[in-house]
Image: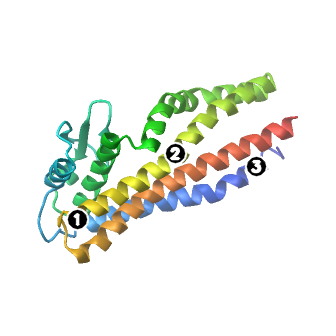
Amino acid sequence: MYYGFDPTFILMIPAIILTLYAQMKVKTTFEKYLRVQSKKGYTGAQVADYMLHSNGIEDVRIEMVQGHLSDHYDPRSKVLRLSRDVYAGTSIASVSVAAHEVGHAIQHAHGYAPLRIRSMLVPVANLGSSLAWIFIMAGFIISPAFLDMGILLFLGAVLFQIVTLPVEFNASSRALAGLESGNIVYQDEIRYSKRVLNAAALTYVAAAAAAVMQLIRLLVLRNQRD
């Protein structure tokens, strides 16, 4: 620390820039293609229902939820929750996001290994996110032993972010394959769906990069304390 400035924070600057860019990219891309209507006119809910049944998945419910970009698949209750814009929308963004969430349901039905690993890491990541910084602060004030414990807890959250990457990329691949093979969108619209899903994927890349750089920063601080 030099006059109140922590030089290790410089390590976080590229990750912060990437995170801000990813957030802007997903927002602008989603809003852009929310205004581009799919030529076949299927709603997100119809797309989800069709893709689920075409993959032999009969036990997943589809529900509409409040919020913006709040779409997700809940593997514990086997519920596909779609935001209003996606559930009832007929835009490229709507069908693309709906298909992506179905991709997660397909992963769950097929026992996709990275999804299973991520599910197992959820309690570890939650614990790490809530307790890590308490131990880390105690490590700087009281004893390095607390700092080591905090870093170990934070590592669980980092692993969760890393494992999330193949899960999200694979769900997008399944989504694009389903949209194309099911003739849900025309061939010339597939590239628009790719843009929507790639923008969403960038947010996960940014989150993983930020978590990794934060871990590196903590390790540097730990070594400096020694």
**Alpha carbon distance from label 2 to label 3:** 26 Å
**Residue appearing at x 24%, y 41% in the figure:** 80
Q: Amino acid at mark 2?
A: Val
| Rendered location of residue 65, percent (x, y) | 22, 41
Residue to which mark 3 is pinned: 8
Residue linked to disc 1:
181
Residue depth check, mark 1 versus mark 2: number of the one nearer the observer: 1
Identify the image quadrant of the C terminus: top right
From the viewer's perspective, tell me whether residue 53 is left or right of residue 159: left
Which of 26/119 is in front? 119
Instruction: Please give the residue where the numbered disc 2 appears in the rendered image.
Output: 163
Q: Quadrant of the N terminus?
A: top right
Q: Secondary structure at mark 1?
A: helix
Could you say which is closer to the camera, residue 187 or residue 36? 187
Measured Cα–Cα span from mark 3 to mark 1: 49 Å
Q: Examine the rendered structure and indicate whether residue 62 appears above or below residue 178.
A: above
In the image, taking residue 24 as reference, residue 185 lies left or right, namely left
Disc 1 versus disc 2: distance between alpha carbons?
28 Å
